[in-house]
Image (cartoon, rainbow, N blue to C red):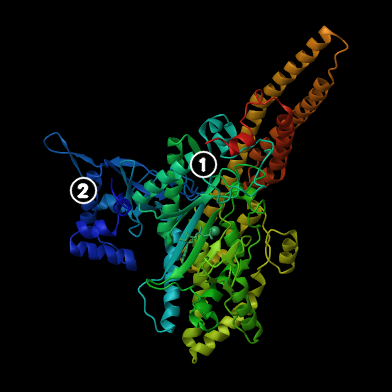
Amino acid sequence: MSTIPELFGSMVFGDAVMRQRLPHDTYKALRKTIDEGKPLDLGVANVVANAMKDWACEKGATHFTHWFQSLNGITSEKHDSFINPSQNGGVIMEFSGKELIKGEPDASSFPSGGLRATCEARGYTAWDPTSYAFIKDGVLCIPTAFCSYTGEALDKKTPLLRSMSAISNEARRILKLFGKEVPQVMTTVGAEQEYFLIDKEDYAKRLDLILTGRTLFGCPPAKGQELDEHYFGTLRTRVSAYMKELDGQLWKLGIPAKTEHNEVAPAQHELAPVFTTTNAAVDANLLTMEMMKKVAERHGLVCLLHEKPFAGVNGSGKHNNWSISTPDANLLDPGKTPMENLQFLLFFAAVIKAVDDYQDLLRAAVASAGNDRRLGANEAPPSIISIFVGDELGAIIDSLADDVAYTCPERVAMDLGVAVLPKFTKDNTDRNRTSPFAFTGNKFEFRMPGSNMNIADANTVINTATAKVLREFADALEKAEDFSAAAMGLIKATLKAHKNIIFNGNGYADEWVEEAGRRGLQNLPSTIDALPALLREKNIALFEEFGVLSPVEMHARYEVSLEGYAKVLNIEALTMLQMANQELMPAIAAYMEKIAAAAAAKKAVSQAISVRAETTLLQKLSASADAMSDAIEVLDKARGAAAAEKDALASARAYHDQVIPAMNVLRAAADSAEAVCGEKYWPLPNYSRMLWYMD
Ligand code: ADP
Ligand code: MG
């Protein structure tokens, strides 16, 4: 058996393999492209392609694919084999530089938000050499960007890469003022992925889980998460085996899966990798999501990545830990004396201003029907963006913004009062779990993204907004005579102007919603409130200024998201109607018949026997069935009306305002029937059994 270091990255055409298999000049040219964003020429690409193909074939690969992230956030692939007919009637395995750097899939069936008509099918994929190629299921996968015939980005990777070079350029200008010349500044991301695992047999019995990824019906379990025993709890045997296999698979793909534990909700878990460059981190996260689902099947489990698979217990998010760094230093590391660290304060202030100025855009980047159910519910950040900085930095900000003296807090030693336990110094700041955008030591943690999302969108916004502020800073400071004084002045003015978004209190409390309103922070509870940010002039101008997205591309994204929202709700409504009509109503009827027959049988034996229990039960079931029947009518009409709306925004709004409430009424009626229906008669596995399944 190979050791883990041998296993790690064994399915990736990474740096070590490149160094080993490519001629030195080719390797150097490719590294220049990867590290400094220099264009790659076709001669180099040919050599790389051939080496890649030989390596992949030795590992059993027969096909290659340009792997890309379409606008609906899912990864897409079309497989081509390496075979080429040879003159003697046989085949040889071939892969050219042209095939490596460019692909031409039919783009007509991918969402484009009106960027092209269905008949204009041509699309291009282009190799992203900054994210390594890898082998998955015998296929060499080449991470690519995807664009239309006319050059508009039809994917999520392209704007992300553009945003990364935007922030790199502006950050380098700032560093230059500090006397530091660096080839590239990268943003880094570590994405903590939450997910649920449930038994495959339960899953197979629920059309709602199969079609929508979440339970549309289900009365609350007798035991939820109230005992707080699941968080960090001992793993179920099957889950532990699953996590071990998942780690192995991810390690082979070069994904440094690091931390795994049970989460707060029963059957909920989390996986966090070691952070890496944003682009590679996004690819790795998408691959992790895919592997999570695939590996689960082999363990008789199903992995649910929906943001809110179960009502009433925590939903799943994806904490996006983000920082900026040079090849050798994290620019958001405050060091021991942040108050004296001008460079840190400048970058720190830039992020705060960026998040404040573009809070609406950041909120829009995490807007979806699934995440709407999570944000603001159990233990998820509200839909208001605020920033947690902790006590020490909070005090620094106060002193800088208000121009008052700052006293550095003493580090307090922790003494647990037991001689054998180690003594250690306490952190200056506690953690805050409720903040949507929290500074956590040397990085910011954006906690609003949903578990099912592609975090490329959120990072594109953070990168570009920060690039914008860094550009303003660099423009001002490059002209300054006294750099340090000017930088300090800028930091003070920035913090003073943007202090409002800093909030270290409990973000889950109702009072915060009011307080945030007084502070003028935006509260955008639903996707339809959030998406119009994509059409706002200042946001279009931001993306246009940095060449990240053109106005046309922005509009396309707005359309795709809005349509996606309506489509998801339409599917949910139809699924509910089908389940209610075809599964639940018949189940209630069958059970009522059984009870009625039992009551009649009792009476046939003797009129003196009481049928009070049967009568009460029948009354309850009958009332629920009536309520369901009414709700079905209302939902059916509301869905029909919403679907018939021609205008995309009006349609999405109709789903939000009419269809969701109708779905809620139907669910409540069905759940009250479930609560009193014999388990044998109810066709759906209940919450208690799904969440507390046996090893
Ligand atoms: P917690 O649960 O306390 O939020 P975890 O240890 O589960 O913390 O996850 C922290 C994540 O942050 C990890 O993925 C880690 O690699 C990542 N991280 C650490 N430093 C950085 C950084 N400089 N840039 C981006 N991500 C980082
Ligand atoms: Mg976290």
Q: Is residue 214 left or right of residue 167?
A: right
| Whole-percent x, y for residue 491 in the image | 57, 81
Judging from the image, what secondary structure is the residue with disc 1 in?
loop
> In the drawing, does residue 450 fall left or right of residue 311?
left
Among the 4 quarters of the image, the one containing residue 540: bottom right
For the residue pair 513 and 173, the one nearer the viewer reads as 513
Residue identifier under label 1: 236
Callout 2 amino acid: Asp
Indicate whether 301 appears above or below 331.
above
* Closer to the camera in the image, 544 or 52: 52
Of callouts 1 and 2, the N-terminal one:
2
Residue 517 appears in the rendering: yes
- The residue identified by callout 2 is 54
Quick check: which quadrant has ligand 2?
bottom right
Horizontally, is 139 left or right of 441 in the view? Answer: left
Residue 501 is drawn in which quadrant? bottom right
Q: Position of residue 142 (x, y in %)?
A: 33, 50
Q: Is residue 670 above or below residue 50?
A: above
Q: Closer to us: mark 1 or mark 2? A: 1
Front residue (pair 119, 438): 438
Q: Position of residue 486 (x, y in %)?
A: 53, 87
Rendering quarter of residue 432 = bottom right
What SS does tag 2 mark?
A: helix
Residue farthest toward the bottom in the current orientation of the protein = 481
Q: Which quadrant holds the N terminus?
A: top left
